[in-house]
Amino acid sequence: MNTRLLREPSRIAAAVSLAASFATLKVAPAQSAAPTVPLARALALVQTLHERDAERESVVLLADVSPAGVRYEWSFLETHAKGDTIRETFQRFVRAADLDTTPRWHVVFEPAGPLEHPGYTAFTISRATFDLLRSAGSAPYSVLAVEDQAAGSGLLAMFGGARPAMVRWRGTLTRVGAATEPFPLLVSGQRVSVPALHLKGSFSARSEKWAPDIWVLAQRDHPLILKLEDAARVFQTVRADLGAGANGSASIEAALARTCRVEVPGIYFEFNSAVLNPASDATIATLAEILARHADWPVTVEGHTDSIGTSAANQSLSERRAAAVRDRLANRGVAAARLRAVGYGETKPRETNTTVEGRARNRRVELLRPCGGAR
């Protein structure tokens, strides 16, 4: 099947995303339960879409979680060749009943589309499907996606303008192996492994066949779709970040006091730019509050990138991203004389740049104060 995901930037206005919640994210001790990603308000999930030599990142928030269901929110910024920019925010509400029982996934966000698509999930499989996969090993399933008129049927499509034709892929999900697999995930900047069900899809639509590999969080209360991979693309959840609540603030403050350096979770930039995503606002506010409590701390904001693109472009991007955080902190009342910004481009990777998750870890912001052991 010849599928295509990315289209001309002027036509991009929607995306598939996955989400979870930050303020209540829990990482259990190593000797007891595995790390969990509960379905809770304000958790931010970062997803990466890799196709050919291109990679783009998006952020989805669980804007609200209630007995009625979950409201997801995804925002993006497009920059066009002439310098024009478009910012959009997309929302999706999934009813609690669909989180419980539906065997269908709706992957498309539309600029003028409805808030709800009853009978579908958006970022998880249902608990009933999860139970069937655990007990029987397979489950009937369908995926509603966009038909790409130029190149066959496309999944996880991004689009704008007139509503394109939709296609429903019908078939089954089958579990690969009896045991769960460890899946790499950054939780508040720390690398952990969460248990995942590895599934193989077998779908058909309009004489086409599609057999993606899908990984789902092995957690019944939040069976999050962690990864989808086929011959054309890898779509993967790479980060789950705590909100800027008391726990997150205390952790950042303690790290700066103890080791004088901290990798800051919750800082997000628009794709290939130094424009801060609105989801960063809470973390910026938290950093400003910490620095207000420690007026004797001058700090350096460090920007880091992955190795995609040229070294010169990455160096410039890291410098501009560090400067953007510095300027936002100054706007929050931190004295400009206390703030310095520096970019290191791709020169100081935390992990390998050969994997999706490694590149996501390397795209980061760190905060440093000059004290013993910091460098």
Image: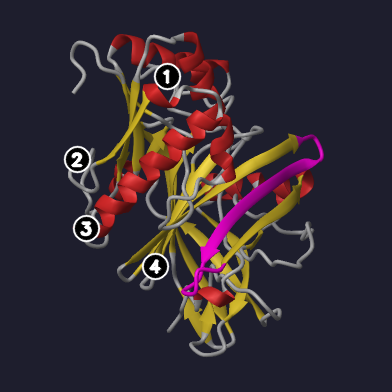
Where is the N terminus found, in terms of image quarters?
Answer: bottom left
- The circle on residue 312 is 3
For the record, the magenta segment spans 66-84
Q: Is residue 79 magenta?
A: yes
**Separation of residues labelled 1 and 3 (CA atoms):** 31 Å
Task: Say which residue label 1 marks.
Answer: 252
Residues 131 and 257: in front is 257
| Left or right: where 274 falls relative to 88 | left
Residue at x 35% of width, y 40% of height: 364
Q: Identify the secondary structure beneath mark 2.
A: loop
Rendered location of residue 217, percent (x, y): 49, 42
Q: How many marks?
A: 4
Q: For the residue marked with disc 1, what is the amino acid? A: Ile
Residue at x 69% of width, y 67% of height: 110
Q: Identify the secondary structure beneath mark 4.
A: loop
Task: Say which residue label 4 marks.
Answer: 233
Give whichever of discs 4 and 3 has the lower sequence position: 4
| Left or right: where 275 falls relative to 232 | right
**Separation of residues labelled 4 and 2 (CA atoms):** 27 Å
Q: Identify the secondary structure beneath mark 3.
A: helix
Task: Say which residue label 2 marks.
Answer: 348
Residue 206 vs 265, above or below: the answer is below
Where is the C terminus found, in terms of image quarters?
Answer: top left
Residue at x 51% of width, y 87% of height: 152
The answer to whether marks 4 and 3 mark residues whose Cβ atoms lie closer than 8 Å is no
